[in-house]
Amino acid sequence: MAKGSKLLRAAGLVLLLAATVALLYGGYAFLRDFKGPKLVVVLVAIAWGLGSVALLYAVLNAMAESLPRPARALALPLVFAGPALALLFWFLVFPTLRSLWLSFFDETGTRFVALANYRFAFADRIMLESFRNNLLWMVFGTLLCVGLGLVIAVLADRSRLEKLYKSLVFMPMAISFVGAGVIWKFMYAYKGEGTGIQEIGLLNAAVVALGGKAQAWLLVPFWNNFLLIAIMVWLQTGYAMVILSSSIKGIPAELLEAARIDGADELQIFFRIIIPAIEGSLVTVSTTIVIFSLKLFDIVRVMTGGNYGTNVIANEFYMQQFTYGQSGRASAIAIVLLVAVVPVMAYNLRQFGERRAFK
């Protein structure tokens, strides 16, 4: 009798699972083919999405709970983590593997070319220029963002207007990279000599007001990279400041006071107490900005399109894929970029694990 009831329950759960899957697909088909008002689409999408996913989890959980104890211990984590892992595989792992596969083929994806695309990635003049520029972003961008963020965090913590100063520095974080590029394009705007048009670019307006000569700043090779790096510093200094400031506030006041009583000046306190105490946060902030520098795309794309010696790896990937149609070369560049980012992420995770173990 008990065995029959268990079989009946299992059959009911299987039927309910089939009905749930049918509901999921039916809602998808309805939204795909529906031609009516958009408000109806939104309401149906919300009701169908939330309801059907909740029902799916409830059914799968009930099926897992009905299993024997050893199988249940394995099934329950899969019910809740399985969909997330499946999405992670589909949207991250699978595209990475596909890009790796395509990197060994030509632009059509049919003719095997071995390492030809990787030879292009490491030998082409534009690619070498992109590597150089990304290195500039990594070194100078990271140093300036972290350095300024640290200095502002230390100084602002001692001011009565701390909240105001920090709000002003952090405010650019609310602006997208594309929006920041548009704003700073006006900052560097150049109308040209002999046009009779007044300079509207803030930088050129300041130079002319001081008796200098307006310049096409973004057209000056090599140095224009530093003008673009200034945009990242403007955007990311607030992030570094907030993280480092919270770490500095975690240093016991008694420790700083004891150092002052022992005769340590402010520079000694800064370098021998504050810096070692926030080393973990410094590593985290630095590696995060380094990763951003490696993947940088938006600012360069909006400001110069990668021209005039400002190209970066991500922009060259975009150009090869969507402008030149060279999917093999674009895939190779994407893999090179991934390989460059992974060691930095691995180091960051290792440092995080060591800090947790120490605590």
Image: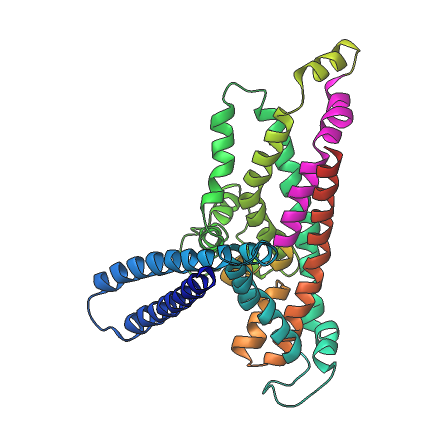
Numbered-mark total: 0
The reply, left or right, for residue 147 in relation to residue 174 is right
* Rendered residue at 51%/18% (across/down): 160
* Rendered residue at 63%/63% (across/down): 312
Nearest to the observer: residue 46 or residue 210: 46
* Quarter of the figure with residue 93: bottom right
Q: Is residue 344 above or below residue 333?
A: above
Give the image location of residue 260, x and y in percent: 74, 12
Give the image location of residue 150, x and y in percent: 64, 33
Question: Would you say residue 271 sits in the magenta stretch?
Answer: yes
Considering the image in quadrants, where does the C terminus appear? top right
Question: Would you say residue 119 sits in the magenta stretch?
Answer: no
* Quarter of the figure with residue 222: bottom right
* Rendered residue at 66%/42% (across/down): 284
The reply, left or right, for residue 82 in relation to residue 131 is left
Q: Is residue 127 above or below residue 50?
A: below
Q: Which segment did they paint magenta? A: 265-292
Main secondary structure type of the part rendered in magenta: helix
Considering the image in quadrants, where does the N terminus appear? bottom left
